[in-house]
Image: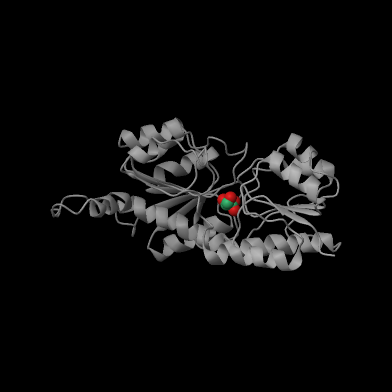
Amino acid sequence: MKPRLIVSRQIAAAVVDRIHAEYDCPYEGKEMTVDDVIAALTAHKADALMITSHVKWDAAAIARIPDHVKILATCSVGTDHLEIPALKARGLPATNTPDVLTECTADLAFMLLLNAFRRGYEYDAIMRDGWKRGYGLGEMLGLRAAGKTLGILGLGRIGRAMAQRARGFGMRVLYSGPRRLTPDLEQGAEYFADFRAMLPHCDALSLHAPGGAGTAGIMNAETFALLPKGAVFVNASRGGLVDEDALVDALTSGHLFAAGLDVFRSEPGFDKRFAALPNVFLCPHMGSATVETRNAMGFRALDNIAAVLAGRPAPDMIWS
Ligand code: DGY
């Protein structure tokens, strides 16, 4: 008999194929709420649950997961939608999908950076509006990447992949985070123990830190003001790191040249003031959204589920 699985959201086709081959799963590809998931787990007597970061699982929700569920596997590297102490207190194994999304998320963050530097949204809008006149050599100018300094908050896996791309474009890289890395991981990036002290040196700032209480609102009126006038801001980590009123102010006042944003405090119903600003390049939380990466994330989640159901340690446990 195949193990029973519930999947709380639409996932990549190749992952669905593997699920149907290996699991008894009533997959419909719909976006489920906590109530939907609990009902499905109970009705199906599920052994395992695969989720994504679209729904928060707080202690109350975690307490409602039936005892026959042996593992919760999230198809995300981020874990801020999970109340990890509650999972641990319950002894419910829980896993994420690190590593496999590093390159694609850094690609997207660098795409945000280049579009912010080079006015990607405005150029595209001009073309879609019929390119009604030619532009003089002093009009619609962006900023050159080469020679600029990029500050990175969080030189973890994705932050380091972002730094690698920046070096390839001739940029100097600074970083800040809880601790200094070894030189082989730094690859020449310069460390600032004090995040605020780094900001005045950044032509561009890119956030790659986890969400949650430790980083909530770390970009606010005070920290945006510490960036030099004309800086560019990129966020492909979590919207909760940013005070969005302060970001809108910094963009409308001209303190920031531009921003590239993939994540927002409210998703999918994001703050529409950003959509009215021509100097913002917007994406709908798509850092890992490539065929290869979404397949790899799903397969990694399934590998974790298989390990736990077979009585083996999960490779990507998020608590110990
Ligand atoms: C992740 O993997 O954490 C992505 O941001 C999707 O939630």
The residue under the point 48% across, 33% down is: 243
Q: Is residue 239 left or right of residue 83?
A: left
**Who is closer to the viewer here, 167 or 248?**
248
- Image quadrant assignment for residue 65: top right
Q: Is residue 250 visible?
A: yes
Q: Residue at x 75, y 42 (%)?
A: 38
**Would residue 315 be visible to someone looking at this image?**
no
171 to the left or right of 211: left
Number of marks in the image? 0
- Figure check: 45 above or below 160: above
Q: Residue at x 79, y 47 (%)?
A: 43
35 or 150: nearer the viewer? 35
Task: Point out residue 314 in the picture as x, y percentages from the top left corner.
Answer: 78, 60
Can you give x and y, in whole percent of width and height, for residue 159 in the image? Answer: 53, 55
Location of residue 294 in the rendering, given as x and y in whole percent from the top left corner? 58, 61
- Give above or below for 103 relative to 220: below
Above or below — where is 255 with respect to 296? above
Nearest the viewer among 162 and 50 is 50
The image shows residue 305 at horizontal and vertical percentages of 76, 59
